[in-house]
Amino acid sequence: MKDSATRTESRFDFDAAQCISNPKPAIVRISHWWSLEGCVRRSFAFVEDDGKETAVQVPEGTTILEAAHSNDVPLEGSCEGQCSCSTCHVILSDELYEALPEPSVEEEDMLDLAACLTDTSRLGCQIRVNKHFEGEKIKLPAITRNFFVDGHKPSPH
C-alpha cells in the first residue's frame, strides 16, 4: 500500500499528545478548529451499508469514532468512546485487522454484544489511525446495538 500523507489543518478536539508521529506539534485553536502543524494525516473512506462512501483525511492518532464524528459519518458511539457499548462497531479489511494490535479483553466483551459481528469487527473508539489506514475502506454495519434501521442518523455527543 502506498504510504502517502499530507500535512494540513484538522478540526479535532483532542490534545497534541495523540499525534503519534510528532508528540510536540504546534497547536493553534481557532474557534472549533485545531491546527496540528507537523502531524501526518491519513486518507481512507467509510462505507455505509447502502454503499455510500465518505472519504476522510485525519491526523494519525485519531480514533475511528472521532474521525467519523468530525466528518458527519453516521457512526453512533453512545458511550462517547469509553468502550462501554458497541454502537461504534466497524468492519475492517482482513489486511487492516491483522496490522492492528489485538483487541483488549474489554473491547472483545463489548464486541460480543454487537449486531452484525464479523471476524474483522472492531470498536471505532478503540483503534487509532496509523499508516496502515492509508487507502482503506472502513465498513459500517447495517444496524447497531441500538438497532437504528429506519434511517435515523445519530448526532455526535
Image (cartoon, rainbow, N blue to C red):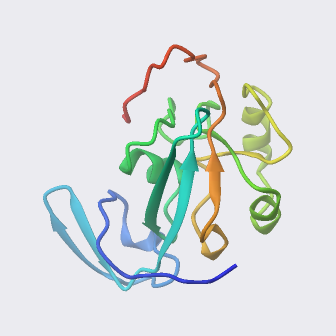
Task: Name the residue located 74 percent from the left edge and 41 percent from the top edge.
Answer: 106
Residue at the extreme right: 119
User: Residue 34 occupies which quadrant of the picture?
Assistant: bottom left
Q: Quarter holding the C terminus? A: top left
- Front residue of 8/127: it is 8
Q: Residue 145, image x and y in percent?
A: 64, 22
Q: Position of residue 130 (x, y in %)?
A: 60, 71
Residue 25 picture quarter: bottom left
Is 152 situated left or right of 3 in this image?
A: left
Residue drawn at (38%, 72%), measured in percent from left and top?
16
Residue 112: % across, % down:
80, 30
Q: Image point 55% across, 18% down: which residue?
A: 148
Q: Horizontal placement of 105 versus 73: left or right?
A: right
Q: In which quarter of the image is the N terminus?
A: bottom right
Residue 154 locus on image (x, y percent): 42, 27
Q: Is residue 3 above or below residue 28?
A: below
- Residue at (75, 64) in percent of width and height: 100
Vertical order, 16 against 56 (above or below): below
Instruction: Give above or below for 157 relative to 47.
Output: above
